[in-house]
Amino acid sequence: MKKLTTKEILKENLSRTAPGYLSSLKILIPNVRSLHNVGSIFRSADAFGISEIILTGITPTPPRPEINKTAIGAEEFVEWRYEENSLKAIDDLKKEGYYLIGLEQTNDSTELPDFEADRYPRMCIVLGSEVAGIDEELLPYIDEFVAIPQFGKKHSLNVSVAAGVILYAMLEKLWKS
C-alpha cells in the first residue's frame, strides 16, 4: 500500500463525474458572514461536483484571501454567482424547476437519512447563517426542510460542516441513480 500523490488523486478525480442528480445540485448561501465558512463550502462543493453556488445578501464573495485560505482555490473551479436579494434568487431557482431543500431544524423537518433525494432531478440546498439559521422570510419558499440527526448536548453544527455532511449524504443517496 502507498498513499496516492496529488497528481494521481487529480487524475482519478478528473476521470469521474458526479453521480445522478448530484451534478445538477446547487447551494444557496444567504447571509453567511464568515469568509472561512464560505471558503470551506466552496471546497466541499468542488469535492462533490456541485454545479453552482449562489451567494446572496451579506455573504462575502471571491476573490478574498480569507475565502481562498479555506477553499484552497476551489472558488476558481466551482461556478458561482452573487445575487443581492435572496428572495429573487429563490424565485429564479423556482422558475428553473429547482426543489429547495432547507437545511434547518423545524417542527416539520425530514431527518436526513429519510430524505428521498432521488425523487428530485433539480435540487438546491439552502444553508443558514451561523447564528440564526435560515432567514425567517425565506422559510415559506422552501419546499422541504431537512435536519441532520444529532445526539450530543449541542444543537447545531458549523454551517460549513453541515454543508459537508449533507453533501456526503446526497452522494450516498444518489450514488447509484
Image (cartoon, helix red, strand yellow):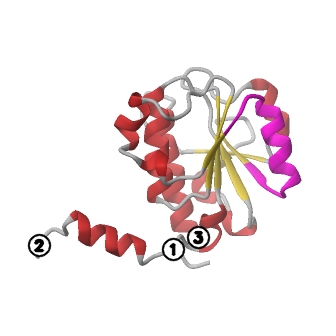
- Residue at horizontal 39%, vertical 46%? 73
Q: Nearer the viewer, mark 1 or mark 2?
A: 1
Judged from this view, the residue extending furthest toward the left is 1
- Residue at horizontal 60%, vertical 27%? 59
Q: Earlier in the sequence, mark 3 or mark 2?
A: 2
- Residue at horizontal 52%, vertical 64%? 171
For badge 2, the amino acid type reads: Lys
Give the residue number, with chain letter if any, for mark 3: 174
Crowding near the residue tagged with mark 3, few <14, some 14–19, many ≥20 C-alpha atoms within 10 Å: some
Give the residue number, with chain letter if any, for mark 1: 17
Front one among 112 and 39? 39
Does the magenta-highlighted stretch encompass residue 59?
A: no
Percent from the top left, x then y, of residue 168?
Answer: 48, 57
Percent from the top left, x then y, of residue 164?
Answer: 47, 48
Give the position of the C terminus as an image quadrant. Answer: bottom right
For badge 3, the amino acid type reads: Leu
Viewed as shown, does residue 36 lie left or right of 49?
Answer: left
Q: Which residues are magenta?
A: 82-100
Give the residue number, with chain letter if any, for mark 2: 2
User: Residue 138 sits in which quadrant?
Assistant: top right
Q: Nearer the viewer, mark 3 or mark 2?
A: 2
Q: Nearer the viewer, mark 1 or mark 3?
A: 1
The Cα–Cα distance between marks 1 and 3, rounded to whole angstroms, is: 12 Å
Percent from the top left, x then y, of residue 162?
Answer: 50, 41
